[in-house]
Image (cartoon, grey):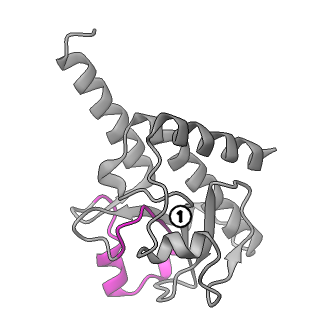
């Protein structure tokens, strides 16, 4: 059923014109469409998302959750994208649990803020245990730093931005 919801959401975005489609030059677009045979996709309950291991892991569990349709980065998200970010977080938690990691208090999930993205396709980093991140990784994935924001902060920021824009346009 969750896969049907994801497919329906992807179809709605395509119809509304907010989906980014496919970029053949984007490695994450190719991975999402199974065009990169060296990348194994992990089970995912939503058809509009894929999950796989990071090729340069910074923690014992380091996964990336990526929308199938090309979306630039977290800075370009709008309020209509909040459901996909929430689903990305659900997938991250589920993949950790499927891989026998159950301490969800010792997890770091978030996005690199542009221009600190290595790939310009929205991707959620899921790292665990966060307590085992090395010195450089703790800097790279520092909570709510200028270059890395948690998924929860991004959802709150997107909602706040929407409210600010809505109110500033005189629609209170």
Q: Where, by quadrant of the figure, is residue 162 drawn?
A: top left
Residue at 75% over, 74% down: 100
The picture quadrant where one finds residue 155 is top left
Q: Position of residue 126 (x, y in %)?
A: 53, 68
Residue 136 in magenta?
yes
Q: Quadrant of residue 113?
A: bottom left
Estimate the x, y position of residue 28 in percent, counting from the top left: 49, 72
How many residues crowd mark 1 within 10 Å: few (<14), some (14–19), many (20+)?
many
Which quadrant of the figure contains the C terminus? top left
Q: In the displayed structure, would residue 93 be above or below residue 127?
A: above
- Of 33 and 39, nearer the camera is 33
Residue stretch in magenta: 119-144
Q: Position of residue 106 (x, y in %)?
A: 54, 67
Give the residue displayed 51% in from the left and 69% down from the top. 29
Q: Closer to the camera, 102 or 118?
A: 118
Q: Which residue is mark 1?
A: 66
């Amino acid at each position: 059923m969750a896969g049907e919801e994801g497919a329906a959401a992807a179809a709605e975005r395509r119809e509304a014109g907010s989906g980014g489609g496919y970029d053949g030059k984007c490695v994450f677009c190719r991975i999402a469409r199974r065009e990169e045979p060296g990348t194994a996709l992990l089970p995912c309950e939503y058809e509009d998302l894929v999950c796989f291991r990071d090729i340069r892991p910074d923690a014992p569990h380091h996964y990336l959750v990526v929308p199938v349709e090309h979306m630039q980065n977290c800075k370009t998200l709008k309020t209509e994208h909040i459901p996909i970010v929430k689903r990305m977080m659900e997938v991250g938690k589920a993949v950790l649990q499927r891989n026998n990691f159950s301490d969800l208090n010792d997890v770091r999930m978030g996005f690199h803020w542009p221009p600190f993205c290595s790939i310009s396709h929205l991707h959620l980093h899921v790292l665990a245990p966060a307590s085992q991140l090395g010195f450089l990784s703790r800097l790279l994935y520092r909570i709510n730093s200028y270059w890395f924001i948690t998924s929860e902060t991004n959802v709150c920021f997107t909602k706040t931005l929407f409210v600010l824009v809505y109110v500033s346009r005189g629609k209170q």
